[in-house]
Image (tube, rainbow, N blue to C red):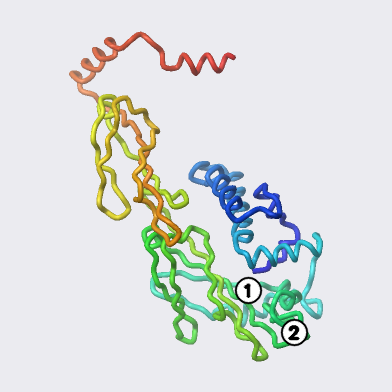
Amino acid sequence: MASQDWFDKDFYKVLGVSKDVSEADLKKTYRKLARKYHPDSNPGDAAAESKFKEISEAYSVLSDPEERKEYDQIRAMGSGARFTAPGGGAGAGGFDDVFGGMFGQGGNQRYTFQQGGEFDDVFGGLFGNGRFGSSSGGFRGYGGPTRGRDVTAHTTIDFVTATKGETITLQAADGKPIKVKIPAGVADGQKIKLRGKGQPSPDGGEAGDIVLTVTVRKHPVFEREGLNLRVNVPVTFAEAALGATIEVPTLRGDPVKLRVAPGTPSGRVLRVKGRGVETSKGTGDLLAVVQVAVPSHLSAEAKEKLEEFAAALPAENPRDDLLAKARS
């Protein structure tokens, strides 16, 4: 939905794409940037976390055809503009006072709601169906009744529920439930629009929408990369050096057996086809990342055997190539 700071934010520049970028290229660029700046890949890096939020906001707008069209129209008006509600007031407090408690909690889900504020009051009628159209704010268009305001909502679900999908319930203050189908494979930060479930029109026009933003909790074992699932799999030094068949967990609960080839280094990715996230658009893979586990305690006998093993190895330094590159 429209936001006043759209005048100042160049989402195309944030993602480094042109204004005529295709949906496929937009998604490809976002995934590349998201992997680069994701907080899990940059622990403790506040700048990376801020950048991740910035690119996520940009993608959430540009990936929605309706919001992208509205954003382009707003940007075309020019940047740096500031507006107030009719009569010179901010126009934000009154709505919160009346509708701040409109929606409560359903089940174990947690929801919060907010409204667009002064920007919607002035520009609500620009992008609808009347002569100026149905309004998403309090502005009355010349060609027809006013459209009700959109309402934003948030819910948090667990990782497994996000991959499988689920129907949840938003419960209004008047006790009327609103059922929402969370699609299988919903991503963290994804928005779901519930048409006609927002604020009623004040004069018999079309009701606004509820825009539900989904937050997905992290999983203790799996990490999502698009439709793929990534899992770190510890192996012993002997298994990595000599080769072995190991069991790897899957999100469905049934482990799969994978062959670790002799001489497998830490960080090698073993791919299991079709064991990722299943959606209507396709199914991803399971990416098992080998992590060679080093024993923290050795018995005297084990230490002696390991020293014998080390002495039997060829006299070479595995860091020679690294040092040579650093000097060049």
Identify the mark at residue 115; answer none if there is no mark: 1
Q: Quadrant of residue 236?
A: top left
Residue nearer the viewer, 288 or 259: 259
Q: Residue at x 72, y 56 (%)?
A: 9
Q: Is residue 295 visible?
A: no
SS of the residue at dot 2?
A: loop
Could you tell me if residue 209 is visible in this image?
Answer: yes
The residue carrying pointer 2 sits among few (fewer than 14), some (14 to 19) or many (20 or more) residues within 10 Å by Cα, namely many
Q: Amino acid at mark 2?
A: Arg
Helix, strand or loop at mark 1 = loop
Q: Is residue 208 left or right of residue 258?
A: right
* Amino acid type assigned to the residue bearing label 1 in the image: Gln
Height in image: 163 above or below 125? above
Which residue: 49% across, 82% down?
172
Instruction: Residue at 59%, 14% (x, y): give it.
Output: 328
Residue 302 higher or lower than 276, as above or below: above
Q: Judge by depth and name the residue closer to the eye, 129 or 49.
A: 129
